[in-house]
Each structure stands twice: as structure tokens, then as C-alpha cells.
Image: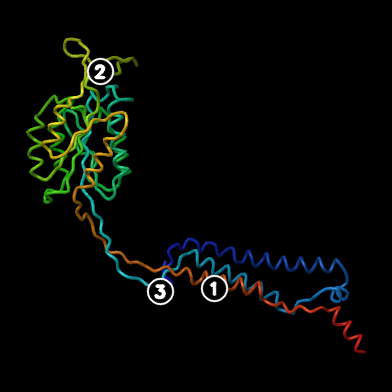
Amino acid sequence: MNFLGVYFKDPEYFNLFWLVPLLALFLWWASRRRKRLLERFGRPDLLGRLSTTPLAGVGFARRVLVLAALVFLIFAVARPQYGKKPVILKREGRDIVFLLDTSLSMLAEDIKPNRLARARFEIVSLLGRLEGDRVALVPFAGDAVVLCPLTTDYDALGLFLEGADTDIISLPGTDISRALKAGAGVFDQEQAKYKVMVLITDGEQLEGDALEVVSSLKEKGIRLYAIGIGSTEGVPIPLKEAGGGAGHKRDDNSQVVISRLGEALLVELARSGGGEYYRAGREAIELDRIFEDIKKLEKRELEARDFTLYHDRYQWPLGIALVLLLAESLLWDGRRAGGARERVDSRET
């Protein structure tokens, strides 16, 4: 809100001006009530002799000072700002794409509550540490899709992350190579650096050749980090059956499928991609290490905006309000001892 060249940062506080007539009414009522109480106490001529009496108009002046102080206090909380200068704010960061495995094997429960839930937790944990970096989400199974393009709205990516489940990709399987290609397409192709991909998977590659793809990513300035979810011993993959029952995934020979962490592939992918491999354990220590590595990477200017910076001047109306309140408290009310003056006059006569 701009008024006579003064900009008010919080003009909604002007709604407090209704307190001014309310306070004026209260002060008038208090003054009238005091007068009525004194009249009920005794005769006005006797009260004039026994007590002090204020000079006419002083009480009114004190009430005006209080009301004026309230007005200036309201102006102060509305944050008046005067004087401005142009400021250019720059935002720097990196582009980070999360490749999230949503295949059925991610339902394995060797990592509690299951691999997919832990993978989502890993991403949310890392988001809480980023500052200014753009992030994107690419879930994959037998295919890959860009669920959330590059954004600085971490809350929005968190919402997309909640919907990233095993049914989001209709094509079954695990094709890491497609995920890498889809993730590479998210980046600005004109930039040769500042690009990071974080692959979170159990490493069971069923289709494609991820090692062949990752070598081309490094040439484009994309650094790949890999987080392995699961155990090398392997566990069955739980499935919900018709009728509400639970079972396990079986192969064509009706044998229970055991899903194991494909750690060797993930280590090779990370090394070929210029990054590091970490296994997700019970503690999120690997996230600390990834975050420290990412922080060392060079940042680029993602955005520059022109802003107008206003100077706060709330001190002016606040100071005036304090002065008015001090004047009200120190204002000499002109009281005179009526009874004492009459005694002096009687002695002189």
C-alpha cells in the first residue's frame, strides 16, 4: 500500500483503527462515571473544599494525547517504509534429478518398512538439506517417466513423491538405462556442468544396458550417484492376492522369487558416472556423505531478479507515540487545593 510516497508493508493492521473510537468512548465513559461517583459521595461545594479540582480542559487534553498515541502506534505496526534502492538478487545452485526405482522388487521388506518407503525417505531427507538447488523426480520400472520437472518447490516434489508407487509405471520390470536417459532429458542441454543424478534402486537390472548409457552421460557433464536399497542375502517380494490375502512373487516355475541387492552394478555405474555409491542402511549416514559431495560441486547462477528494497521507518511513528504517552503522564493537570486556599483567604481577612 502506497500513501503520499510512503509504502506500508503490513497495511492490514489499519483495521485496528476501529480501536480509536472504542477507546475514546471508554475514556469518556470513565470520566463521566468518575464524576457521578464523586457527586454521590457528597455535595459539590464540600468536595471542592476537601479535594483537588482539575483545571478545565486538561482532562480532555490528556484523553486526546492517549488517542493520538494509539493512532501512531497503529501506523508503526503497519510498517511504513520510505526511501528505496534497486537490488539484484541472484540465486545459485545445481540441478539434481532423483531416479526412483518403483518396480515390484522395491516392495521387499529387508529394509523396513520396505525398500520403496525407505527410498522415499532418503529423498525427503536429502531435500531437507538442499538450498537453492533445482530438483526433479523420475520414477522407473520397465519404463521411465518424468513425474516432476526441475523445480525449487521442494514441497511440490514431496507431493509427487507420495504418489510414486509400484503402480505408477504400467510396464513391469527394471530398466535402469531408460531411467538414465529420461533423467538426462530433464537437464538444460546447453549447460555442460552443474548436473547431478541420484539413482535409488535395488540394482536388479532386468532390461537394457545401463553401463553403456552412463558413459555418454559423463560426456554431457552429468554426475551420477547411486544408493543401493536392500540386502545382498535377498528376500521374497510380497504381493497382495485376490481376496485380500498376501503371498510372494513367483517365477514361471512357481518358485518364490528372491530379490537381492545388485551392488556390483551400482558400484560400477557410480564410478563410470563420476560419482559415488552408497548403501542405505538403518541410519541415513550415506545421505550426509552424498550431501557433502554435492556441496563441493560448482554452482551456477539459476536466476537473477531485480527487487526494490524499501527502508523501514516504523521508528518515526513509534517514537511519536512514546513521546505522546510520556507527555500524557507528565502533563500537569492544574490541580489546586480548594479547601486550603479558602483557609488561607480566611486567615487574611
- Quickly name the residue at label 2: 235
Per the rendering, the mark at residue 5 is 3
Amino acid type, residue under disc 1 in the picture: Ile
Instruction: Indicate left or right for 214 with 138 as reference.
Output: left
Assess disc 1: are there few (<14), some (14-19) or many (≥20) residues with their C-alpha within 10 Å of its C-alpha.
some
Q: Which residue is mark 1?
A: 320
Q: Using a 10 Å C-alpha cutoff, classify the residue at mark 2 as few (fewer than 14 neighbours), some (14 to 19) or many (20 or more).
A: many
Which label sits in the foreground, 3 or 1? 1
Marks 1 and 2, how far apart at CA: 74 Å
Left or right placement of residue 67 versus residue 295 in this view: right
Where residue 217 sits in the image (x, y, percent)?
A: 10, 40
- Find the residue positioned furthest to the bottom: 349
Q: Residue 158: percent from the left, percent from the top? A: 31, 40
Residue at left offset 46%, top offset 65%: 79
| Secondary structure at numbered mark 3 | loop
72 relative position to 308: left or right? right
SS under mark 2: strand
